[in-house]
Image (cartoon, rainbow, N blue to C red):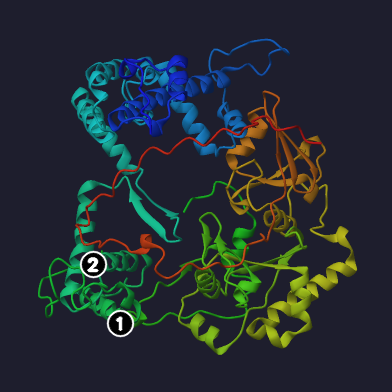
Amino acid sequence: MVRQLIPEGLAEMVPGPELGALLAGIDIHAVTGADAVEILRARARQLSHEQARLLATMVEVGLCDPDALAGEVARLPESPPYAADEIRAALAWTRRAADREHDFAETLVLRMPAVFTALDTGRICRSKAWVFADLCSDLTPEQTAVVCSRLLPKATRLTTGELAARIKKLAIALDPEWAARRYATAVRERNVIGYLNEDGTATVTGSALPIDEAAVACAHVEELARATKRAGHPGRIGPLRADIYLGLLDGRWQQCTRDQIIADLLSRATRDTDHDVDPVNPAHPDDPMGPPAGGDDSAGGEPTGSASDCDSSDEDVAARGDGAETSMDGAPAAGSPAAAQPARRVGVELRVALSTLLGRDRHPGEVAGWGPVTAEVVRTVALAQLAAEWRYALTDAAGQLLLAGITRRRPHSTTLEDTAGELPPCRGGIVELHLSATLLTELAADPGGCGEWAAVVADVAAQYTQYLRGGWSTQAAQDPTARFAGAVLRRHVQIRDRSCVYPGCRATARSADLDHTRNHDHGGATTGANSGPLCRHDHRLKHLGRWRLHQSAPGHFSWISPLGRAYRMEPRPIINDLPDPRPRPDHADPGLLARPNDGPILERPPPQPDPPLPATPSDPHQPPPS
């Protein structure tokens, strides 16, 4: 291949249109390795420049005057509340992402111009600009100027970790009292958070914990894990730590001594941890301490989601467990590891296809607010919540809602009752069953084929028949002049709309406000055709942020932004058309071979890069609703 020579001075070129045109004419496959590195650095500078231009444009969008006349260029002195929502709708971003990017843009452009200039000229990347903006956010302008003057000249060759460490050190040195106050304030806001990982597992972590107590807590988990290993546990140390962490949190060992906890872990090991044994050396799992030795003689003492700001009337119903026919009361005596269970469990909102519970498929279900979970998890959660409120959502062939309601029936079999009997009662929670009218007709015609679910199917079929005889107009019927929706209408709208009806918002409908699309005090009726769930932010956005909302048909929402852009929200299908399984060979995914987690518990995961910006749609201006 003929070598393509790159222009002289490429390494020093300032990013902008000229550099962009030059890079567009280079064939990266026809340059030497050294030249490729220079092109890489040039493209990084150009990317920083374009990201700076994007941030500057976000600031201008936020300052545009929504009261300007047609064709008039007018700006506000400062961005109004909800300014980021225009960005959010135009680029199909989440509210969190739009707020974050707009705040970041205003911080750089308006309050940290030196950092913005460094990004615009390609001297630093976006991630480093983010570090400056984030870690200087609580500093005074004078302190920020000192940090920037000292570190910006060096930032080009510093990693983000190195830069962050230097900024933190400078900040503490600049104001020790403030640093101490900030620490104390943060500890007062300590919390526990959880989220779903891409592989279907969950992460639960504490944030803003006091460092001394956190260190002791980690040492406690570590000591229990090591003691259990020495007592003969065959599993790897990493999963063992996780088991101890969950056991201490969920209350199963609340009345247990340290020795009883270890005994319980050992009793569970043979049936639960066979897959955790080191596949390379099964006789000696990956504990750096070596093979487990006899008993442990060291002394040890006994162990010592997102909140909703909305008012769901179904909470009390779920908390009472109305509709349960299976009693799960009664707690085992404390003191025995086998009997060590929490007195009551907290329920969750589970959404699952009835066909999956019947074993006809292995489609994923959903834990509302967390995300999709496997069929095996779905079945386990459903059977653990026999005392929760059980809903059903009957759909047409396209997966759209036909009928929503509740069932007081539960599956019954010896296996299910034995499973339920081992579990303490749950507090609250919802199990939402999804099935099409076609499947319901098929199941109702063959009750024997439904197994333990026959009673549930019969109940839903009877309600569907009664509903058809009564006419479609009876669905979620109530007094349209009433100020507040009743439980039936509220439940119907929650199931129909699934989540907040602002485009892209994933706040669950159950945690959201039930909003009158046309305000009740302006004559809006309390009906399904004039109701929709709005999370608290988007509820305020509608009433205070100068956004207009229309519902042309039940579940069809149109948002009009203060700048006149229209964004439509169509009804979400209850049941999605999922493809048939296409399993891969057992050896085809090397990513499933996890690295041994035998390092110290304080080991930090590798730092994650700043998330890339979502791509801008090719046509960001969606057509107005027809």
Q: Which of marks 1 and 2 is nearer the N terminus?
A: 2
428 relative to 172, above or below:
below
Name the mark on residue 270: 1
Going by the picture, which residue comes out furthest to the left?
297
Q: Which amino acid does label 1 sit on?
A: Thr
Residue designated by label 2 = 237
Task: Work out whether residue 527 can be spotted.
Answer: no
Q: What element carries label 1?
A: helix
Task: Work out whether residue 315 can be spotted.
Answer: yes
Q: Quadrant of residue 301?
A: bottom left
Closer to us: 284 or 366: 284
Q: What residue type is labelled 2?
A: Ile
Exactly how many numbered labels are in the figure? Answer: 2
175 relative to 317, above or below:
above
Horizontally, residue 184 falls left or right of residue 119, namely left
* Residue 108 placement (x, y as % from top left): 41, 21
The reply to whether callout 1 and callout 2 are in contact (CB within 8 Å) is: no
418 relative to 6, above or below:
below
